């Protein structure tokens, strides 16, 4: 694992549900010693990718990421382009709709449009990675991939998120095949417990 990978692993610890973290927590989450983790945190802080709160000494995302995100959206405005399509999908289906982007081995949510037709809201953390084997979006994505790609994606250790998560590759492939026939995928309680 390269130095860059190790630094980026720290950035990937942050989410809506974990907007800040301390040195000990980061080291524990990454299974690294504190000295090494501090070195990466200091480097990221020097470039403005994270900032340290002087009172709590915890770290949060910094302005350099905002700048890069703004450049990305200005030059590749996926969110804006997707919004009208998602609104139409919500109107037609009555369900919350979201657009995800494939990112190495998981999906990252780009845009979310919530339904007004349901009394219960589904909260989707935009920073959370959606695993391919445990989400309807992931199975739908895999259904559009070749069998070779599906085999490669399922050749790594498959994480069990809940008791309902399907972790046997052949069983996941059956879900992918079903999604190919249906044109969509439905999963219940496989990523988060209901």
Image (cartoon, rainbow, N blue to C red):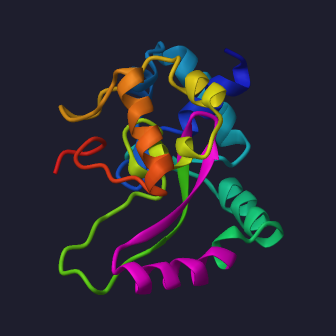
**Quarter of the image with the N terminus in it:** top right
Would you place residue 19 above or below residue 21 in this image? Answer: below
- Taking 87 as reference, is 83 left or right? right
| As drawn, 194 above or below 120 | above
**Whether residue 52 can be seen here:** no
Q: Which residues are magenta?
A: 81-107
Residue lying furthest front in this view?
Answer: 181
Tell whether position 94 is magenta.
Answer: yes
Q: Is residue 49 above or below residue 87?
A: above
Q: Quadrant of residue 28?
A: top left
Locate residue 81, reporting x and y percent: 69, 77
Q: Quadrant of residue 66?
A: bottom right
Q: How far across and how far down the image is residue 128, in percent?
A: 44, 48
Residue for point 18% across, 81% down: 119
The residue drawn where x is 41% and y is 44% is: 178
Q: Is residue 86 left or right of residue 7?
A: left
Where does the image place residue 110, in percent across and percent down from the top left? Answer: 58, 62
Residue shown at 55% from the left, 33% from the top: 10
Nearest the viewer among 8 and 186 is 186
- Give residue 107's position: percent from left, percent from top: 54, 46
Q: Nearer the viewer, residue 90 or 34?
A: 90
């Amino acid at each position: 694992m390269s130095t860059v990978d190790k630094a980026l692993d720290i950035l990937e610890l942050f989410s809506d549900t974990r907007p800040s973290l301390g040195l000990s927590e980061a080291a524990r989450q990454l299974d690294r010693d504190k000295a090494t983790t501090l070195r990466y945190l200091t480097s990221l802080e020097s470039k403005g990718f994270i900032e340290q709160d002087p009172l709590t000494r915890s770290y949060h995302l910094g302005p350099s990421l905002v700048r890069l995100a703004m450049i990305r959206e200005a030059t590749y405005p996926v969110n804006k382009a997707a919004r009208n399509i998602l609104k139409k999908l919500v109107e037609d289906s009555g369900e919350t709709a979201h657009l995800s982007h494939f990112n190495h081995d998981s999906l990252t949510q780009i845009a979310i449009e919530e339904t007004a037709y349901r009394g219960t809201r589904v909260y989707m953390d935009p920073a959370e990675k959606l695993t391919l084997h445990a989400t309807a979006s992931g199975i739908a994505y895999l259904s559009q991939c070749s069998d070779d790609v599906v085999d490669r994606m399922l050749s790594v250790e498959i994480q069990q998120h809940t008791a309902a998560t399907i972790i046997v590759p052949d069983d996941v492939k059956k879900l992918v095949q079903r999604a190919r026939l249906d044109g969509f995928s439905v999963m219940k309680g496989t990523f988060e417990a209901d």
